[in-house]
Structure formats: structure tokens, C-alpha cells
Image (tube, rainbow, N blue to C red):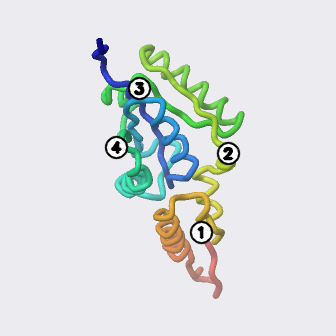
Amino acid sequence: MTNPRNPDIAICPGTYDPVTLGHIDIVERASVLFDVVIVSVTDGSFKKRPMFSTEERIAFVQRAVGHLDNVRVCGFNSLVTDHARDMGARAIVKGLRAIADFDYEFQMAQINRQLAPDIDTVYLPASSRYSFISSSGVREVAAWGGDVDAWVPSHVAPALKARMAEAQSGRAKVTPDMNHHTTG
């Protein structure tokens, strides 16, 4: 006799600016643990102003997880617990790279638990080959012209390089009282 039940749904929330191979590793591993995984791309937060639009980030993630049949991607702009409830999720999956991640994520999990006692936070430690990769680190290296191809999906690297080139050309300006370029 089969047990008719709702599927186990988890969300993997984040800014994904840009999505990294570390993110994809966490999503792939979560897809084995849950019936349905929803990669939830936030519009941003009061602390972060994304480089890429929500639509661009969703498209990058969709292409990167297209090989996973039980993974969906969507955007959201609300409390993560409200979004989890809207999606029917019983878990929020977060990747942890280091102790610093744990300190922050543990505090967020406690806040989320107060807001939604019925939704648990599940931590997946980063795989060793991705444990040093962060979106902010990728952006920093790319801003200085460094090669980030090994850290992001192949379709993201050219877009990141192009966006960095746009940002660099947009920041250079000639000061009126000096005849040289400055960044500002």
C-alpha cells in the first residue's frame, strides 16, 4: 500500500549574483534529498545591490540546472519564510563554506524558526573543490580582469566579463581640473 503524501519540497534561496559552481553543487545535492527543489532568486536585499537583474540571474540559474528534472527556478521578493510557505516548502537549504557562513546562517535560521516553526533549515557543507568560491569573490576577481571560468557555469563567464567591461568603461571619467583619468 502506497502512502499518498505531498512531495518534500525545499527552497534554495539566494541572490545568485552570479551563480557559481558551488551553488550548483548544493542544488544538485539537494535534488537528491528532496522530491522538488526550488532555486529561489531574490530581487535583492537592503544589504545587496545585484550586478545582474533578477531576470538575468534566473536565466543563468535555469540554464545551469536544466539537467535536473526535479529542480525549478523562480524569483521572489519577500521574507524567505513567506516565500517558502507560498511554495509549499518544508525546508530551506543553505550551503556552508566556512565557520563565518555558519555564524550568519545559524542566526538567520533562528530568526526563520521564530517566523515559521514548521519550516526547517538544512545545511549542506560546501564540497572541498568549491569551499572557497563566493559570488562576491568571483565578482572581485572578474573586476580586476582575472579568470573566473573555473568557478562559474560556462554561459555565465562571458556575461560576467561583459558586465565588468561595461562597469569599467562607465566608471572612467576625466576630471575637469586634471588631464588624467580617475575612477569614481
Residue drawn at point x = 30 percent, y = 28 percent:
86
Instruction: Report the amino acid beneath label 1.
Output: Gly
Residue drawn at point x = 50 percent, y = 64 percent:
154
Q: Is residue 29 left or right of residue 127?
A: left
Label 2 to label 3: alpha-carbon separation = 26 Å
Crowding at dot 2, Cα within 10 Å, few <14 / some 14-19 / many 20+, comes out as some
Instruction: Report the amino acid beneath label 2.
Output: Ser
Whether the residues at callouts 2 and 4 have beta carbons within 8 Å, the answer is: no
Nearer to us of marks 3 and 4 is: 4
Q: Position of residue 78 (x, y in %)?
A: 37, 34
Label 4 residue SS: strand
Instruction: Report the amino acid beneath label 3.
Output: Thr
Of the numbered discs 1 and 2, the one sitting upstream in the chain is 2
Label 2 residue SS: loop
Above-or-below relation of 24 to 165 = above
Label 3 to label 4: alpha-carbon separation = 15 Å
Residue drawn at point x = 48 percent, y = 51 percent:
49
Label 3 residue SS: helix
**Quadrant into which the N terminus falls:** top left
Whether the residues at callouts 3 and 1 have beta carbons within 8 Å, the answer is: no
Most extreme residue toward the right, as rendered? 99
Nearer to us of marks 2 and 3 is: 2
Q: Is residue 15 left or right of residue 135?
A: left
Whether the residues at callouts 3 and 4 have beta carbons within 8 Å, the answer is: no
Crowding at dot 1, Cα within 10 Å, few <14 / some 14-19 / many 20+, comes out as few
Instruction: Report the amino acid beneath label 4.
Output: Cys
| Disc 3: which residue | 81
| Disc 2: which residue | 131
Nearer to us of marks 4 and 1 is: 4
**Quadrant into which the C terminus falls:** bottom right
Residue 74 is marked as: 4
